Image: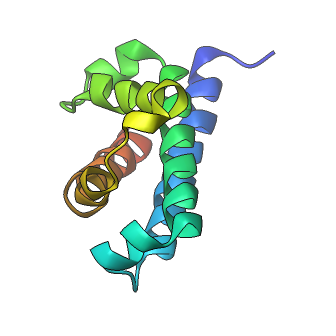
Amino acid sequence: MKDRKDVSLDRLFHVQKAIVEIEIFTHSSSLNDFLNNSFLSSAVLYQFSVIGEAIIHVDPFLLEKYKYPWFKVRSFRNLISHEYFNIKLDAVWEIVQKDLPKLKEVIEIILKEEF
């Protein structure tokens, strides 16, 4: 049976992989591409759902060591899963552009310092 640290490591790797997927999907895309390509927006939303679900399973004491609004990650997953009809794709694009790089940075720091 895996201990909490092993589970947290696995889940942080899931977050890291999902971030890379979003970066690959959106690398050569514009806001207009994102708004008009349902395959692209759906793929990105799925990866954000993976990120949120994975964060739920990371040891909260580990996350508390690092300044980041973790509740937003979990809340965004809930929005995607339960309130999908309220998602504003332009806001998602803004998250991809402005918030995702910071999340990536924090995840890389946690992986480096804790494991």
**Front in this rendered view, residue 7 or 98:** 98
> Is 81 drawn above or below residue 49 in the view shown?
above
Q: Residue at x 59, y 45 (%)?
A: 14
Q: Residue at x 30, y 54 (%)?
A: 100
> Is 13 drawn above or below residue 28 in the view shown?
above
Residue 114 is situated, as x and y percent measured from the top left of the image, at: 42, 34
Residue 105 is situated, as x and y percent measured from the top left of the image, at: 29, 53
Residue 91 is situated, as x and y percent measured from the top left of the image, at: 25, 51
| Residue 114 in sight from this viewpoint | no
> Is 24 drawn above or below residue 103 in the view shown?
below
Q: How is the image coloured?
A: rainbow
- Residue 98, quarter of the rendered image: bottom left
**Position of the N terminus by quadrant:** top right
| Residue 91 in sight from this viewpoint | yes
- Residue 93, quarter of the rendered image: bottom left
**Front in this rendered view, residue 83 or 23:** 83
Q: Residue at x 40, y 70 (%)?
A: 34
> Is 78 drawn above or below residue 111 in the view shown?
above
